[in-house]
Image (spheres, rainbow, N blue to C red):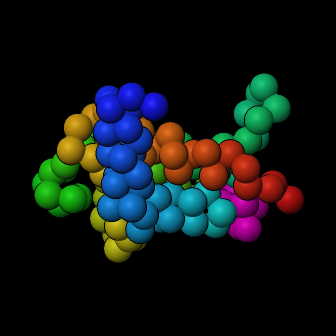
Amino acid sequence: MDLVQAIAARRAQFLVQREAEGIQSLIQHSQAHIDEGTVRKNKDGTVTTVFTIGVQDKRLNDGRETIIPKFWNGKEVSHKEAVEFALQSGKTWPSGDSIEEAHAVDQYAHSFINKQEIK
């Protein structure tokens, strides 16, 4: 592994550690839809338990790019509603110092979400 790869790997590890609580919030949000039977069955045979968007809102993580669910109570909601639901939840949602960082954290969370069992 060269120096650039080592730095990138260390940065990724730091992001995952820093955003662990927010990542857990996304995983729990998905699991709640599974447990409550409020998953969305898609035409292609897949199911949606969490659909995420990146937002910049001063009320979430001091305006940093924050990943929040856009899928609440078994349905996809508007961008504005998603922000309000995220705030009302009282949970910590993952964020990044850039869109790229936030996207990387989201992908990491989805690596676990995609392994959840649908009953």
Q: Which residue lies furthest to the front in this view?
A: 2
> Is residue 85 in sight in this rendering?
no
* Quarter of the C terminus within the rendering: bottom right
* Quarter of the N terminus within the rendering: top left
Looking at the image, residue 45 sits to the left or right of residue 40; the answer is right
Q: Which of 77 and 113 is in front in this view?
A: 113
Q: Give the residue displayed 34% in from the left and 54% down from the top.
A: 14
Q: How many marks?
A: 0
Magenta-highlighted residues: 33-38
Q: Give the residue displayed 38% in from the left and 38% down from the top.
A: 6
Q: Residue furthest bottom?
A: 90
Q: Residue furthest right?
A: 119
Residue 59 shown in magenta: no
Residue 52, percent across and down? 47, 43
Looking at the image, residue 49 sits to the left or right of residue 98; the answer is right
Residue 97, percent across and down? 21, 44
Q: Give the residue displayed 76% in from the left and 35% down from the top.
A: 46
Looking at the image, residue 118 sits to the left or right of residue 101; the answer is right
Picture layout, residue 114 above or below residue 2: below
